[in-house]
Image: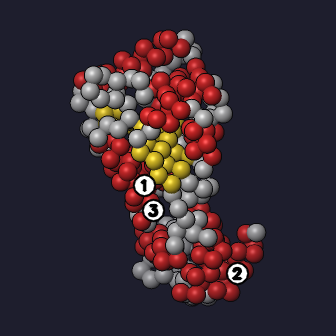
Amino acid sequence: MYLEHWNLNLLPFENVPNPAFFYPSPTHEEALERLKYAVYHGKGAAMITGGVGCGKTILSRALIKRLEKERYHVAAMTNPLLAPVAFLHSVMCSFKESYADTPPKTKLWNELEDRLMKNMERGKGSVLIIDEAQAISDRRTLEELRMLLNLQTDDKFMLTLILLGQLELDHLVDGVEPLKQRIAIKYRLNPLSLTDVGAYVGHRLRIAGSKQSPFSDEALETIHACTQGVPRDINNLCDRSLLAGYLENIERVDKAIIDEAWQDLN
């Protein structure tokens, strides 16, 4: 709607996890490097936590984009709120196995181990990414996560497990000590600083085709103050501000436009 007005090719602030828009802020870059380390060195399990809208899902997509398909078989789950058997069934489906009906648990375990072993024989690592892991409310399913990490050869894990979740995931994992002990890499994503908010907004605009940011410095400061550096809130506020600027036919987004958009959102 406002693309032509702002000389854009794409909508720059959509809240979808398009890895092309991934911005490597210091906190997101460190999280990505820790995940890559866990995968490349077969560390078994890694866990990234963060507040709502802090960029965990787009981080996972950025990781997947960087893992060579020839070297890694990556499976991703976004709805882990399942009982144990249904969870294992979903894991197998994520690894591109299909079933007419849900097989017994023993069969699922045997076929999962067989799948991981075949990947190893082909020289490929197996990676399972579970997003929204804080939604796992059944302790028995958390125990299944622990059992996944028992799938090992004499010298390596057969699977790298990556858990992404909101802050309460820490508490869930703390309640299952054997699982907690097996998570080698942990990191918490932080909100963006004022400097990073400006860089983040500029980055997304450039990816969308902009040659010059329409946001004034004062507008960027206001965006940071309103959103406290949370990427999802930044996206919503910037999108609404660009729409307001288009409707008012202005060429520069200032503090007044940001304040108006923030009030509209809230």
- Considering depth in this image, is 228 or 57 the residue closer to the camera? 228
* Image depth: mark 3 or mark 2 in front: 3
What SS does tag 3 mark? Answer: helix
In the image, what residue type sits under mark 1?
Answer: Ala
Which residue is pictured at 34% across the width and 24% down the height?
A: 152
Crowding around mark 2 (Cα neighbors within 10 Å: few <14, some 14 to 19, many 20+) is some
Whether residue 79 is visible here, answered yes or no, is no
In the image, what residue type sits under mark 2?
Answer: Asp
Whether residue 139 is visible here, answered yes or no, is yes
* Mark nearer the N terminus (1 vs 2): 1
* Mark nearer the N terminus (3 vs 2): 3
Check if mark 1's residue and mark 3's residue have beta carbons within 8 Å. Answer: yes
Which residue is pictured at 55% across the width and 65% down the height?
A: 191
Where's the C terminus, which quadrant? bottom right
What SS does tag 2 mark? Answer: helix
Give the residue at mark 1: 31
* Image depth: mark 1 or mark 2 in front: 1
Q: What coloring was used for the rendering?
A: secondary structure
- Considering depth in this image, is 87 or 14 the residue closer to the camera? 87
Which residue is pictured at 70% across the width and 76% down the height?
A: 261
Q: CA distance from mark 1 to mark 3?
A: 6 Å
Give the residue at mark 2: 259
Q: Where is residue 256 shown, x and y percent of the image?
A: 68, 87
Q: CA distance from mark 3 to mark 2?
A: 27 Å
Give the residue at mark 3: 27
Q: Which image quadrant is residue 83 in? A: top right
